[in-house]
Image: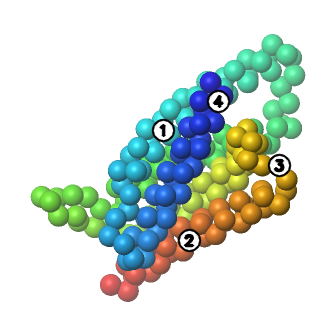
């Protein structure tokens, strides 16, 4: 099950990054698409990832209960992974449909308010935390990481992309304030 969840994690990460890049370029007015179909495929993979994550969490609690040692306070990465994942799930509901909807073949925009800006920045922050806490074990599991140098390069690339996403959302919000 962990192997399947690892594969799902890679798929979700790739889809998230592609959707984030396409969506950011869309918000900046560079391209006309945002990768919505890609996002829905990612949501399916995310649903499976959540189910596996819950099952693995329950297994961890059962093992610690049988073992007699919980170490819940000491395992901050465990709780950071769960909390950031839960935050992502909650904030995704603000993201879905936040920009607009189809009406008789026309795409109608919703006003992009300060609440939507905050929700999207929180979503990006939760994604940032979740990815950075989980990317190292993911890369180790896939045999990609051997040394610290490669890990630093990957973290740098992911940081730049997440800054692009946040910058695009802020740009989009400010463009609503000008109009």
- Quadrant of the image containing the N terminus: top right
* Residue found at x 17% / y 64%: 106
Q: Name the residue under label 4.
A: 3
Q: Along the horizontal axis of the image, is 146 left or right of 112?
A: right
Residue 56, which numbered label? none
Q: Name the residue under label 1.
A: 45
Q: Distance between the residues labelled 1 and 4?
A: 14 Å
Q: Nearer the viewer, residue 76 or 19?
A: 19
Residue farthest bottom in this picture: 178
Q: How far apart are marks 1 and 3 (CA)?
A: 28 Å
Q: Is mark 1 on a helix, strand or loop?
A: helix
Q: Hey, which quadrant is residue 100 in on the image?
A: bottom left
Q: Position of residue 76 (x, y in %)?
A: 80, 42
Residue farthest left in this picture: 104
Q: What element carries label 3?
A: loop
* Residue found at x 38% / y 57%: 35
Q: Residues within 10 Å of mark 3 (few under 14, many from 20)?
A: few
Q: How crowded is mark 2: few (under 14 residues within 10 Å), some or many (20 or more)?
A: some
Q: Position of residue 112 (x, y in %)?
A: 38, 69
Residue 164, which numbered label? 2
Q: Along the horizontal axis of the image, is 31 left or right of 90?
A: left
Counting residues from the N terminus, which is met first, the one under dot 1 or under dot 3? 1
Label 4 or label 2, whichever lies nearer to me, is 4
In contact (CB < 8 Å): disc 3 and disc 4: no
Q: How far apart are marks 3 and 2 (CA)?
A: 28 Å
Q: Which of 12 and 82 is in front in this view?
A: 12
Q: Position of residue 33 (x, y in %)?
A: 34, 65
Q: Along the horizontal axis of the image, is 74 left or right of 150?
A: right
């Amino acid at each position: 099950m962990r192997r399947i969840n690892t594969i799902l994690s890679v798929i979700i990460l790739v889809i998230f990054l592609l959707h984030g890049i396409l969506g950011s370029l869309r918000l900046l007015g560079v391209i006309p698409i945002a990768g919505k179909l890609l996002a829905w495929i990612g949501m399916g993979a995310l649903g499976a990832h959540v189910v596996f994550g819950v099952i693995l969490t329950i297994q961890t609690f059962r093992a610690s209960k049988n073992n007699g040692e919980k170490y819940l306070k000491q395992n901050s990465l465990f709780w950071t992974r769960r909390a950031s994942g839960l935050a992502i799930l909650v904030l995704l509901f603000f993201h879905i449909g936040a920009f607009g909807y189809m009406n008789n073949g026309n795409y109608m925009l919703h006003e992009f308010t300060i609440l939507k800006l905050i929700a999207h920045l929180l979503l990006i922050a939760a994604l940032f935390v979740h990815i950075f806490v989980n990317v190292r074990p993911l890369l180790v599991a896939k045999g990609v990481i051997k040394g610290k140098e490669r890990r630093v390069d990957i973290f740098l690339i992911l940081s730049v992309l997440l800054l692009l996403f946040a910058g695009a959302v802020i740009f989009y919000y400010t463009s609503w304030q000008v109009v």
